[in-house]
């Protein structure tokens, strides 16, 4: 039975690509580097901002000093433009409404920096209760390390991995679910391909948010009936 669904944020609940791309291109320009095409950001996002900067920069500029310079330009700009173009994917709020009404708890486990994660949840999902809202934080490992999933699970006393689903749009997310020993749902509307997700044999691969709520509620009903 599912008691908790832990969601990735970028590419799963929210289409954030354009705002991330605009902020990163702004930082690249300020650092005297060529900007990236927006389509390239499908593969650049998802591994935390430091890896985003490292991959966006020209190969000969990928040193720690330049990465921190990128951060100094990116974060203030992104904080000021965090929701210019960002929106929930179609069907996300309906899915959350359906699951919430059935008593399913939610958490966030993202590689987006913590302040940005909290700001977007407050902007778009303040009507929902999340037992944990976790982003990238200094001194904490990023996904696919399973620590963030285990920390999210502390939001519900006595929960077991069998009662948890991790939901995301990338290979990193699928690896995170495997590493944490929980079921993984891969969503194909995000930044990565169906082929990338299916390579990890997720519990479920979905093309529409309603498929998540249908599968979870059906699974819960089936288990209750069997008991």
Image: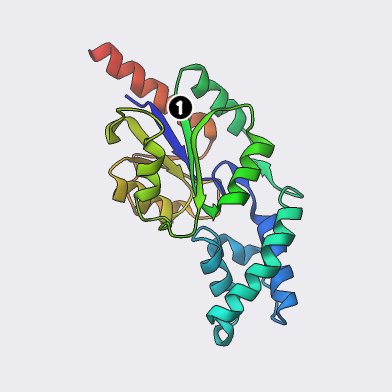
The residue singled out by tag 1 in the image is: 105
Judge by depth and name the residue closer to the eye, 198 or 158.
Answer: 158
Judge by depth and name the residue closer to the eye, 66 or 35.
Answer: 66
Q: Quadrant of residue 22?
A: bottom right
Which percent across, then down, holds residue 187? 48, 43
Judge by depth and name the residue closer to the eye, 9 or 136.
Answer: 136
Which percent across, then down, holds residue 223? 28, 19
Could you classify mark 1 by the number of other residues whose Cα lies within 10 Å: few (under 14), some (14-19), or many (20 or more)?
many
Work out which residue is located at the far left of the displayed protein and give it.
Answer: 227
Q: Is residue 138 visible?
A: yes
- Name the image quarter holding the C terminus: top left
Which percent across, then down, holds residue 113? 56, 55
Q: Is residue 202 above or below residue 125?
A: below
Work out which residue is located at the far front of the displayed protein and give it.
Answer: 139
Q: In which quarter of the image is residue 103?
A: top left
Question: What residue is rendered at 42% in x and 56% in y?
Answer: 140
Q: Is residue 210 above or below residue 190?
A: above
Question: What residue is rendered at 69% in x and 74% in y?
Answer: 28
- Name the image quarter holding the N terminus: top left
Q: Is residue 84 above or below residue 62?
A: above
SS assignment at label 1: strand
Position of 119 compared to 113: left or right? right
Q: Is residue 198 visible?
A: no
Question: What residue is rendered at 41% in x and 33% in y?
Answer: 155
Question: What residue is rendered at 52% in x and 17% in y?
Answer: 101
The color scheme shown is rainbow
Judge by depth and name the residue closer to the eye, 203 or 83.
Answer: 83
């Amino acid at each position: 039975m599912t008691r908790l669904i832990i969601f990735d944020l970028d590419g799963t609940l929210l289409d954030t690509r354009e705002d991330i791309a605009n902020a990163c291109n702004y930082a690249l320009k300020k650092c005297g580097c060529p900007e990236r095409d927006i389509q390239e950001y499908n593969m650049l996002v998802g591994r935390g901002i430091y890896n985003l900067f490292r991959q966006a920069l020209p190969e000969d500029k990928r040193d720690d000093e330049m990465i921190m310079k990128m951060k100094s330009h990116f974060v203030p700009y992104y904080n000021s433009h965090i929701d210019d173009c960002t929106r929930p994917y179609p069907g996300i709020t309906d899915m959350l409404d359906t699951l919430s009404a059935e008593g399913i708890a939610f958490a966030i486990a993202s590689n987006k920096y913590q302040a940005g994660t909290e700001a977007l949840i407050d902007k778009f999902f303040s009507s929902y209760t999340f037992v944990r809202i976790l982003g990238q934080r200094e001194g904490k490992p990023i996904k696919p390390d399973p620590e963030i999933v285990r920390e999210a699970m502390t939001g519900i006393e006595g929960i077991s991995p069998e009662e948890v689903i991790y939901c995301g749009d990338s290979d990193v997310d699928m690896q995170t679910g495997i590493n944490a020993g929980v079921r993984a749902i891969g969503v194909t509307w995000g930044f990565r391909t169906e082929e990338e997700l299916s390579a990890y044999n997720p519990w479920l691969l979905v093309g529409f948010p309603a498929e998540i709520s249908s599968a979870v509620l059906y699974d819960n009903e089936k288990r209750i009936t069997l008991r």
